[in-house]
Every structure is written in structure tokens, then in C-alpha cells.
């Protein structure tokens, strides 16, 4: 079961990245903005904010992000469930469809796949962000360690392993801060992409009628 889960997650990730650069006509975007520049920009922003968040995420920020992500996951799951049948009923029922009907069917089919994969991957990223944020809630004191000063916690009484333990905690929560910020940026971008593409598809559909 775990192997299937890993396989499915990899498939969703690969397909989401693929459909981010494909329009509803199936045309591939040859630009490098979505593939490299955007990811590099998010990475740089994550590292930059990491240096400003020297004591980690505040409890208020963790609570706010957790609530927002939980609501977002619920909305996207609802959109996938209720939109599945509706989107797949867009294909033409004509026995001998003309070229225009076939084009519309192809566009609807491409949009369904784009919407499904990108929305699904956004849900996966939101769940991972929630899990990482839960570390700050479970280990509030340790998560607020200043990695640029590496001060010992007074509550730690272990003398032999405290330097190694401190280093491990610092590395863990340093990585957590960077990854959480990166995921939040990706989730925000993909949510805007989903909403914008949905509005564009709905507008095009209405204009045809």
C-alpha cells in the first residue's frame, strides 16, 4: 500500500508540473518561467524569510496557517468531488460531431485533467505543510530556537549529548521553516492559477453558448 501511495503521489506531482505549462488546447509553453525561474524565486524568498524568522513561527502564525490550509483542503476536495461528474459531462453527445465540437471537447478534456492534477497536488502540498506546522505546535519551545545563536535550553539536563541534540534540533527546524515557507508560496501560486484558469474556462464556455 505504501508503494502505491508513493507511486500515486509521484504521478500527481509529475502531472501537475506538466499541466502547469500546458494550455487547454494541449499546447506546451516553451518558456522557462514556470519551470525554473518561478521555483528559483520561491526558493530565494524562502531563504530570505528564513533569515528574518530567527526564532521560528509564532503560535498565532501557526494557528492562522493551519486554519487557512484546513479550509483550503476542504474546499478543494469538495471541488474535486462535485466537479468530477459535471466536468466530464462536457463532451459532445453528437454521433458525428463537427470540427468545432471536437475542439471544444478536447479543450474541456484538457481542462479537466489540468484542474484535477493541479488541485490534487495543491491538496497534497497543503497536507504536508500542515504536518510540518504541527511540529511547531507540538514542540513550541524547541521550534523557537534561534539557529543563529544556538543557545542551550535550560530545561535540557543531558550533558553528553546536548550539543549533538541541539545541532539536530537546529537543523530540523531550520529545514522546517524553509520548506513551510516554500510550500506556502507554491500553494498560493497554484491556488491563484486554479482560480484564474477556472474563470477563463467558464468565461469561454459562456461565450460559446
Image (spheres, grey):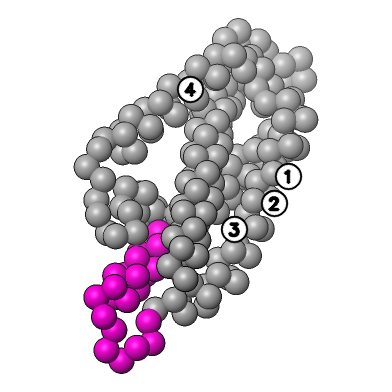
Q: Which mark is residue 9?
A: none
User: Residue 173 location in percent, x, y?
Assistant: 58, 27
Determine whether label 1 and label 2 are within 8 Å by CB: yes
Vertical placement of residue 203 versus 30, above or below: below
Q: Which residues are magenta?
A: 92-116
**One can see residue 113 in this view:** no
Q: Which mark is residue 71?
A: 2
Compare marks 3 and 2 and give the one earlier in the sequence. Answer: 2
Q: Which mark is residue 45?
A: 4
User: Residue 103 location in percent, x, y?
Assistant: 29, 70
Task: State the residue position of label 1.
Answer: 67
Vertical placement of residue 168 versus 52, above or below: below
Q: Residues within 10 Å of mark 4 (few under 14, many from 20)?
A: some
Q: Secondary structure at mark 2?
A: helix
Q: Secondary structure at mark 1?
A: helix
Corner quadrant of residue 7: bottom left
Label 3 and label 2: CA atoms lie apart by: 9 Å
User: Residue 109 location in percent, x, y?
Assistant: 37, 69
Label 4 and label 1: CA atoms lie apart by: 23 Å
Task: State the residue position of label 3.
Answer: 76
Label 1 and label 2: CA atoms lie apart by: 6 Å
Q: Residues within 10 Å of mark 1 (few under 14, many from 20)?
A: few
Q: Is 94 positioned to the left or the right of 78 in the image? A: left
Q: Residues within 10 Å of mark 3 (few under 14, many from 20)?
A: some
Corner quadrant of residue 97: bottom left
Compare marks 3 and 1 and give the one earlier in the sequence. Answer: 1
Amino acid at each position: 500500500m505504501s508503494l502505491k501511495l508513493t507511486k500515486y503521489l509521484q504521478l500527481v506531482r509529475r502531472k501537475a508540473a506538466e499541466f502547469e505549462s500546458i494550455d487547454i488546447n494541449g499546447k506546451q509553453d516553451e518558456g522557462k518561467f514556470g519551470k525554473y525561474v518561478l521555483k528559483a524565486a520561491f526558493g530565494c524568498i524562502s531563504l530570505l524569510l528564513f533569515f528574518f524568522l530567527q526564532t521560528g513561527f509564532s503560535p498565532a502564525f501557526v494557528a492562522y496557517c493551519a486554519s487557512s490550509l484546513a479550509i483550503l483542503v476542504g474546499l478543494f476536495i469538495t471541488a474535486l468531488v462535485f466537479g468530477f461528474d459535471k466536468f466530464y459531462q462536457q463532451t459532445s453527445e453528437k454521433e458525428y460531431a463537427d470540427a468545432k465540437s471536437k475542439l471544444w471537447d478536447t479543450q474541456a478534456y484538457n481542462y479537466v485533467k489540468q484542474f484535477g492534477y493541479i488541485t490534487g497536488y495543491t491538496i497534497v502540498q497543503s497536507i504536508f505543510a500542515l504536518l510540518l506546522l504541527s511540529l511547531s505546535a507540538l514542540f513550541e519551545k524547541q521550534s523557537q530556537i534561534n539557529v543563529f545563536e544556538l543557545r542551550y535550553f535550560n530545561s535540557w539536563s543531558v550533558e553528553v549529548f546536548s550539543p549533538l541534540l541541539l545541532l539536530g534540533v537546529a537543523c530540523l527546524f531550520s529545514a522546517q521553516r524553509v520548506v513551510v515557507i516554500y510550500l506556502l508560496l507554491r500553494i498560493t501560486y497554484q491556488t491563484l492559477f486554479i482560480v484564474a484558469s477556472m474563470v477563463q474556462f467558464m468565461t469561454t464556455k459562456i461565450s460559446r453558448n
